[in-house]
Image (cartoon, grey):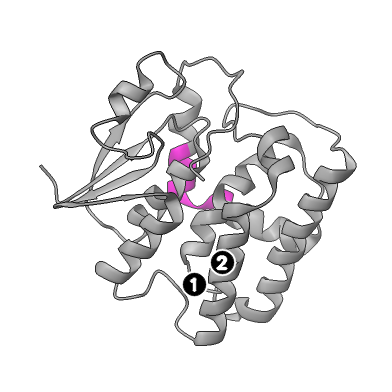
Amino acid sequence: MKEFRLVIGNKNYSPWSMCPWLLLKMFDVDFEEIPIQLYQDNTAEKLGPYSPSLKVPVLLHKEITIWDSLAICEYLSEQILGGSGWPASPRRRASARSTSAEIHSGFPNLKREWPMNCKASCQLKPADALLNEIARIDAIWSCCRRKFGENGRYLYGRFSIADCMYAPMAICFDAYGAELSSEANAYMQTLLDNPFVQKWITHGRREQEPLSIAYASNA
């Protein structure tokens, strides 16, 4: 048994499972992946031994259990990455934590109306409430890239937890045809070009589960 075990849902439509998975991959941490199909009659039964919340993702590390995507990423950064999951400077770190928490807890219209679906490819016209949320994410991406992105292509220059939290949104925006500013679009493409994001998308597209699935939330 490997030291770290990550319980995740279907890659096609479990955005929060993707966040710690991507962090582990980007920092080359060896871990066991435990996939559990969501929205099945026996899903709760299968999650019971791993997840107190009966949701994904869950990280198992020795005798410790951590659930919730952002909590898992924080734990990994503190315990095995020497804090490098976040930007080094206090100002960048404070901003990265704020933007990560915002996507984690907010944007209900986006999560409901444009759920992550690696197989989707269509042009949807968003309602006003959704347009406002897309504009907010565009502003976050553009502002952070202008202020903090001088040392790399990611949101705060080098790769961080913030990029993990927004990678599923890049998949959603690409799938449903979001109209973004040039700066935000360039950042979205950076996420989509990440080899591990590409690997996740490829595996998600190979899954055979029905697609009429509600947004898989762990909040």
Per the rendered image, the range of residues in magenta is 192-200
Q: Amino acid at mark 2?
A: Tyr
Going by the image, does 189 lie left or right of 9? right
Along the viewing direction, whichever of 36 and 32 lies nearer the viewer = 36
Disc number for residue 154 = 2
In the figure, residue 150 lies in which quadrant? bottom right
Residue at 61% of width from left, 65% of height from top?
99
Q: Check if mark 1's residue and mark 2's residue have beta carbons within 8 Å.
A: yes
User: In what quadrant of the picture does the N terminus appear?
Assistant: top left
Q: Which is the main secondary structure of the residues drawn in magenta?
A: helix
Q: Residue 50, percent across and down?
A: 26, 37
* Label 2 secondary element: loop
Q: Amino acid at mark 1?
A: Arg
Along the viewing direction, whichever of 14 and 67 lies nearer the viewer = 67
Residue annotated with mark 1: 158
Relative to 169, is 156 above or below? below
Q: Residue 203, percent across and down?
A: 43, 31
Residue 197 inside the magenta-drawn segment: yes
